[in-house]
Image: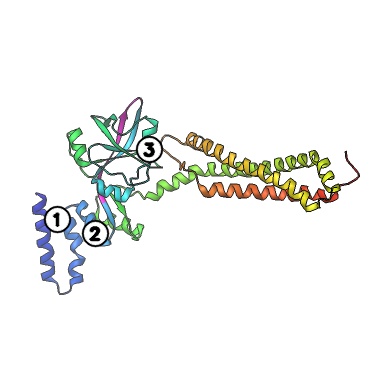
C-alpha cells in the first residue's frame, strides 16, 4: 500500500477511536498501536520520539571499504546533513566552527584524512556491501575523536552509487528522556534490532586510555622529583661558586638580605628562562608525542592547554622558591674570615 494511503488509513482509525471514546486520554492511549499496525515500526518509533520530545534524525548507515594509497574502512552515515550536523557536531578541525555542508561530496573525519593523506577536493573510492564501488569527492574534514565516521547526503549517495539510501538507523538525542524508558518502548514497538548508547563508545575509550593516564601521571611525578633534585644541586653549586663573592659583599657592608636578593635575582632569571624554553620545546614535542600515541581509529586532543602551562610554571616557581629558601639560608652562616 502506498505511504499516502497508509497515513490516510491511520488518520481515519485514530479519528474513529476519538469518536468511540468519551475521554481524550483513552483515545490517545491506543494511537501508537494504530500507527504501528497501519504504518510500520519506523513510523511508530518516530511517532514515539516526537511525543517524548527527543531530537532525532533518520539515517542510512553502512560500513564502507575505502581505497586510497591503502585500504581502509569508515562508518558511512547518509541523511539530511543539517540534521546530522545538529546532532553530531561536525566542526571544522582548523577553525572549530561548524562545517558548512554543500551536499556535493563526503565529509570525512580528521584522523582518516591524516592517515590517508586526503584534503578537501581529493577523490577516493568507496565500496558498499562489497559490490557497489564509486569515486567520491572529499567535501570537508571535521574533528572527531572516536571511530572513523564519514557523512554524506542521501541525494549524493544515490547520485554516485545509483541506489537509494534506505534508512536503517535513527540517531537520537534524549533531551532528558530516560535511556531505559526509550529502550523499553522501542522494544514494544518492534523493528529495532539493536540499541547502542553513545556512552558505550565513551566508556570503551576511557578504559583504553586509562593506562595512558596512569603512565602520564607517573612521568609527571618523576619529572617533579627530578626538577626538585636538579634545582637543589644547581643552587648548591651556585652557592659554592659565589661563596667568596658573597663573603666579600658581607665584609664590604652589604646586609644578609642584600646578598640573598643579589643571588636570588639571578636564580629567578634563570628559572624564568628555563620555563619559557620548556614551554616552547614542550609545545612542539607534545604535539608529536600525542600524535604518535594515537591509533588509526582514535584521535586525542592535541591542543595546547594554557591552564596546563600555567600550572607547570607555577609548580616550577614553587620548587625554585623552596630550594632557594633552603640553600640561601647558608648566607647567614658565612664565615667572614674564610676567603677560600
Tell me the magenta residue range.
57-69
The reply to whether residue 257 is in sight is: yes
Kindly report the secondary structure that dominates the magenta region of the rendered protein. Answer: strand
Please name the residue shown 26% across and 30% down the image.
Answer: 130
The reply to whether residue 129 is visible in this rendering is no
Residue at horizontal 47%, vertical 46%?
206
107 or 287, nearer to the observer? 287
User: Which residue is at the front of the view, 332 or 43?
Assistant: 332
Count of residue discs: 3
- Image height check: is 309 above or below 281? below
| Position in image of residue 47 (x %, y %) | 21, 58
* Dot label at residue 38: 1
| Callouts 1 and 3 close, C-beta under 8 Å | no
Q: Which of the colour schemes (rainbow, by chain, secondary structure, one colour) is used?
A: rainbow
Sequence order check: which comes first, mark 3 or mark 2? 2
**Residue 220 image offset from top left, x and y in percent:** 61, 43
**For residue 110, which quarter of the picture?**
top left
Residue lying farthest to the top in this orientation: 69
Residue indicated by mark 3? 110
* Label 2 SS: helix
Amino acid at each position: 500500500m502506498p505511504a499516502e494511503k497508509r497515513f490516510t488509513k491511520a488518520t481515519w482509525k485514530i479519528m474513529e477511536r476519538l469518536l468511540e471514546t468519551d475521554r481524550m486520554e483513552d483515545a490517545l492511549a491506543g494511537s501508537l498501536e494504530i500507527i504501528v499496525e497501519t504504518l510500520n515500526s519506523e513510523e511508530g518509533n518516530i511517532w514515539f520520539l516526537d511525543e517524548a520530545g527527543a531530537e532525532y534524525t533518520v539515517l542510512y548507515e553502512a560500513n564502507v571499504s575505502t581505497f586510497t594509497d591503502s585500504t581502509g574502512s569508515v562508518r558511512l552515515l547518509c541523511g539530511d546533513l543539517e540534521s546530522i550536523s545538529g546532532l553530531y557536531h561536525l566542526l571544522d578541525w582548523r577553525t572549530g566552527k561548524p562545517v558548512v555542508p554543500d551536499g556535493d561530496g563526503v565529509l570525512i573525519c580528521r584522523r582518516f584524512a591524516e592517515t590517508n593523506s586526503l584534503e578537501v577536493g581529493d577523490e577516493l573510492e568507496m565500496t558498499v556491501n562489497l559490490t557497489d564501488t564509486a569515486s567520491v569527492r572529499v567535501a570537508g574534514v571535521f574533528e572527531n575523536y572516536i571511530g572513523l565516521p564519514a557523512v554524506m547526503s542521501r541525494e549524493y549517495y544515490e547520485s554516485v552509487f545509483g541506489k537509494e539510501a534506505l534508512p536503517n538507523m535513527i540517531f537520537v538525542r534524549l533531551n532528558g528522556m530516560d535511556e531505559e524508558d526509550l529502550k523499553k518502548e522501542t522494544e514494544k514497538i518492534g523493528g529495532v534490532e539493536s540499541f547502542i548508547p553513545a556512552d558505550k563508545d565513551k566508556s570503551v575509550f576511557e578504559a583504553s586510555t586509562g593506562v595512558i593516564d596512569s603512565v602520564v601521571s607517573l612521568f609527571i611525578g618523576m619529572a617533579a622529583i627530578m626538577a626538585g633534585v636538579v634545582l637543589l644541586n644547581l643552587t648548591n653549586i651556585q652557592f659554592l661558586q659565589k661563596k667568596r663573592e658573597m663573603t666579600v659583599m658581607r665584609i664590604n657592608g652589604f646586609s644578609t638580605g642584600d646578598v640573598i636578593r643579589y643571588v636570588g635575582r639571578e636564580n629567578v632569571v634563570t628559572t624564568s628562562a628555563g620555563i619559557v624554553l620548556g614551554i616552547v620545546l614542550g609545545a612542539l614535542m607534545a604535539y608529536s608525542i600525542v600524535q604518535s600515541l594515537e591509533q588509526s581509529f582514535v584521535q586525542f586532543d592535541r591542543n595546547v592547554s594554557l591552564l596546563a602551562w600555567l600550572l607547570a610554571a607555577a609548580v616550577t616557581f614553587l620548587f625554585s622558591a623552596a630550594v632557594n629558601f633552603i640553600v640561601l639560608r647558608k648566607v647567614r652562616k658565612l664565615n667572614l674570615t674564610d676567603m677560600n
